[in-house]
Amino acid sequence: MSDAPQYDIAFLGQYTKDTIVTKDGSRVVNGGAYFYGSAAAASMGLRVAALTRLAPEDFSSFRLLLERGVLVKAISTQKSTCLQLLYPSANPDERILSVTSVAEPFEPADVESISAPVWSIGASIRGEVSLTVLKAIKAKGARVGLDAQGFVRVVRDGQLAYDTEWPEKAEVLRHVDVFKADVVEAEILTGTRDLHEAARILARYGVPEFVLTHGDGVVVYAEGSFVEAPFRPRSLVGRSGRGDTCLASYLAARISMDPEKATFWSAALTSLKMEALGPFSGTREDVESALRERYGR
């Protein structure tokens, strides 16, 4: 029997039923970091597993992932996590999030059956993925990517709010290899919107790599150096899921690429994703074309 991992990369996070409200109207879409992330990784031809929790009536939401060859381990809960994302302006970093229901949190047993050298943890709200679950994944010897949003966001009076106090921060970050935050989360965690300075501050916790996003692009800090790449989308109709796609495509690219190449790959793929609703639906060839045409690479 082979000891080789079953999958190249695994994604963990609750499905979210998202009502997106912009000046152009509202629409309900399937969401969640696991959803956007696993689709992006699958486009690279990787063996992808996705673990999520959701209500039985929403199981049809991941049919798209199954069609793309993703193994989906769906765990039934009484309710799915349902969010409303209000974008009051054209700035994708400016949004107001409300919560109408929350699925039950993950348990360590949920991750036991999946073997992958890279895991991406994309929670929506603090408590969805506990430190115990994180340790269970790290105990597998995995390289762990983690999004700040699921650890600094809490529910207060039906609204998603940011909590500047994160008691488990130091212990969580000790188990993380790639930490992702947007400019708002970076400021909450470090007190500065300067992403270079934020990375240096967070690096004191022992995290080796950072993926930091802002409205215009991505800043990566890896191997002691910074790499920056702009987003160059031709429209922003699919901006919801931008950060989830950016982290996932970076982690997937890092399996075979150095930090610089992975950064530009992530920026190009994320740019393409923002041009259409839903998760990234293109191919490796589409990303390679965007790298040539939009980045000269």
Image (spheres, rainbow, N blue to C red):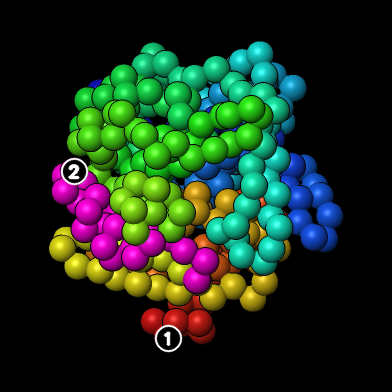
Residue 51 belongs to magenta span = no
Q: Tell me where residue 258 appears, x and y as whole percent.
A: 25, 64
Foreground: disc 1 or disc 2? 2
Q: Position of residue 96 (x, y in %)?
A: 64, 47
Q: Which mark is residue 205?
A: 2
Left or right placement of residue 22 versus residue 75 in this view: right
Residue found 56% across the figure and 47% down from its top: 36
State left or right for residue 286 relative to residue 264: right
Local secondary structure at mark 1: loop
Tag of residue 177: none
Residue at 32% across, 24% down: 131
Identify the secondary structure beneath mark 2: loop
Residue 120 visible? The answer is no
Residue position marked by numbered label 1 in the rendering:
296
What residue type is disc 2 on? Tyr
| Residue shown at the point (59%, 73%) measured from the top left | 233
Task: Name the quarter where the C terminus is drawn.
Answer: bottom left
- In front of the other: 213 or 74: 213
Residue at the image position 36 percent from the left and 17 percent from the top: 108
Dot 1 crowding, Cα within 10 Å, few <14, some 14–19, many 20+: few
Image: magenta residue range: 193-216
Task: Check disc 1 and give the amino acid type.
Answer: Gly
